[in-house]
Amino acid sequence: MIVSRMLLKLKLKKDTVIKNDLNYFLYSSIFKLLKSQFEEFTTNLKSMDFKPFTISPLRGNFKIDGENILLYSGYYNFEITCIGEKISRIFYAILCKAVVEKMKLTLGGAEFDFVSIIPSGRNSNQKYGVKILKRGKIYNKIKFSFISPTAFRRKRINYLFPEPYTVFSSIYRRYLKFGGKEFRNITEKNLSDLIVVSKYNIKKAVFSVKGDIVRGFVG
């Protein structure tokens, strides 16, 4: 299985105030960019229950003031992580075109210039990312970093912290969805008995999903 990660660098030329819904603006703007270059691909992405990519929060110099965010002029960046070779190639090609053609990325009224795209992680000299999850290799310990504000929902309950069962059952379902093979003797029911948390550094985080406030975590 191929997992790729791309670091996008942006530039904002003037201070701008937008509504405090930055994650929503970032996702919707990326979808708009994808649709403008490859409409059929974007339509298929939207129809998927599990999206084969994630977008990190925007990083840079900004200030949250109640319902608004003040974005200061300067450089910003964020990462896109994709699962699968085809998805990775398409994302990389479209984002490279956005950089070369000096396209704009508009987030709630703030107009950013694309500056650069850099494949990040191990073997970052590869054209579009990083191969991980090598077949036959066993990992006794796995470290997770929840960069984006995250929440897990099960039986109409939002969990404030990432319990092992909710984390791994969610990852396992996505792993199977995108072509992974079932693990022998592992089911969602016995995941809790197989996983032990050794260290953690988690903080509460509040974020917005389609205008609704959700309580989750980062760390």
Image (cartoon, rainbow, N blue to C red):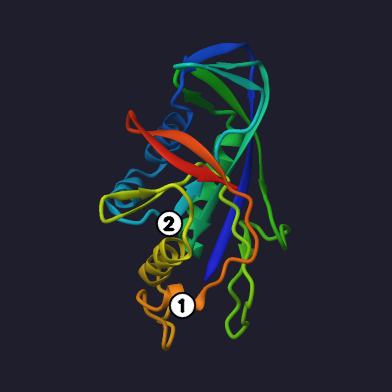
Disc 2 marks which amino acid? Pro
N-terminal label among 1 and 2: 2
Asked whether the beta carbons under mark 1 and mark 2 sit within 8 Å of each other, the answer is no
Q: Is residue 8 above or below residue 41?
A: above
- Circle 1 is placed at which residue position? 193
Q: Amino acid at mark 1?
A: Asp
Q: Is residue 187 left or right of residue 162?
A: left
Callout 2: few (<14), some (14-19), or many (20+) C-alpha neighbours within 10 Å? some
Residue 142 at x, y percent in the picture: 62, 68
Mark 1 or 2, closer to the camera: 1
Residue 141 in picture, x, y percent from top left: 64, 72
Disc 1 secondary structure class: helix
Label 1 and label 2: CA atoms lie apart by: 28 Å
Q: Residue at x 51, y 44 (%)?
A: 217
Query: Which residue is disc 2 drawn over?
Result: 52
Viewer-side residue, 110 vs 192? 192
Element marked by disc 2: loop
Where in the figure is residue 5, as x and y percent of width and height? 60, 53
- To which quarter of the image does residue 96 belong? top right
